[in-house]
Image: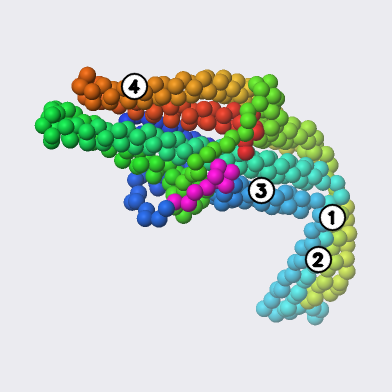
Amino acid sequence: MGLSSVAPVFSRVSHARGAAVSVGLLVVTAAAAVGAPARADTPARVTLDEAVARALDRNPTVTVALAEIDRADALLRQARAAWFPSLIGVGSYTRLDSDRHNGGTVIAYENQVVANLQLTVPLIAPVAWANGWHAADNRHIAEVSAIDVRRQLAVATARAYLAVVAQHRVITADENARNTAQAHYDYAHTRFAGGVGRSIDEVRAEEELRTNEVAVEGAYSALVHAKEALGVLINADGPVDTVDSVTLGQPRSLEAALDDARTQRTDLKALQARLAAGERTVKDDWVYYAPILSAVGEPFYQHGVIPQTAGWQASLILTLPLYDGGLRTGIARERDALVVESRANLDLALRQAQSDVRAAFDGMVHADKALVAARAAADLARRALDLANIAYKAGATSNLEVIDASRESLAADTAAAQSEDLARQSRLDLLAASGRFP
């Protein structure tokens, strides 16, 4: 099915000073990749659950998946049509230049009309039956694949949502650094204007302020792109913003997550359905060797021919395939190869799913530890900045120490924002890998 070709791509939302957040997206749009003019209206705010629900309800990929189910259902109806009787009507009119005579007797009139109905009833039709069974299997595959497309879309939406949340956190860190730089510049400027400060202190403070202003504007630009990407995923008419809090499901133990991956992952279910369908086609090879029996009934009417008559005839037609030049052998070999491929793909996907769960679980553990350390580092960096400001105002140091402390505080706050995003993304990875999201 064409849905399986829908694969996630990656969009990067970058902080102007290097803080990057990777987002797996199912769709790529120009609005999310290229800067757009600023909008005057305020973007709508949605929760994570609302964003996922809207994406599953509105995104065109879901529409395509549902259309694939309808298509598979139509193909099933076509295949099963061969199970039922068929009725064909045939009529013809022939005009001769004149009557045909033989020794004064008319043997064919110049106007001839022939009409008949042919009713064919398949009594034994193994090939038609098998085609119907296989079409039903394909419809089931389309249904399972559509569910997996919804899962991929939900995960992509959640990643885009978390990217917006993380970018807000980065903006907060940049704005705090800018505000600190503004206060430092105001103090240095006041001292210099009052004749008790140095010009170099004022210049350094202003340079740090302008640098932080650049970072703030870059962060807001990245936020615009992240909002636009989220809006595209939920099929909104413009950018979409997030709420302040995000709640993800509580991860289970590693053993439980591994069990869930084997039983809950929709991509594995789709591969299992493909393997089962392939195995059925192999078992159904016998239908190409079985006889076909049909009953044919034909009422007819003839006018203008000799003799002119109306009537009916009925017959049983038995078809026994004896030699086909190797067609059936080729079909069997092709189906065997497809089963081997399906089984290998399923085995690989199972191993990959187990690996995804283990990696996501370990990543979550390390991300949580890193978050604790990053928050502690951010707190210490802010304390160091406060101490540097106190020492500078007391005349114990130059403002170089203040600027260095400010930069280190910004870096620590940015690292904390990245760590928070990594912790959330790690939980999402584990939930998705175990088949428990959405």
Of the residues under marks 3 and 2, which one precedes in the sequence?
3
Q: Would you place residue 293 above or below residue 193 in this image?
A: below
Q: CA distance from mark 4 to mark 1?
A: 91 Å
Of the residues under marks 1 and 3, which one precedes in the sequence?
3
Q: Does residue 278 appear in this view? A: no
- Mark 1, secondary structure of its residue: strand
Neighbour class for label 4 at 10 Å: few (<14), some, many (≥20)? some
Horizontal and vertical percent for residue 257? 66, 25
Residue mark closest to the camera, 1 vs 3: 3
The residue under label 4 is 384
The residue under label 1 is 121
- Magenta stretch: residue 59 in it? no
The stretch in magenta equals: 43-52
Could you say which is closer to the camera, residue 365 or residue 381? 381
Per the rendering, the mark at residue 117 is 2
Could you say which is closer to the camera, residue 207 or residue 292? 207
Based on the displayed image, in which of its 4 quarters is residue 182 positioned?
top left
Residue mark closest to the camera, 3 vs 4: 4
Q: Amino acid at mark 3?
A: Ile
Q: Would you place residue 43 above or below residue 321 in this image?
A: below
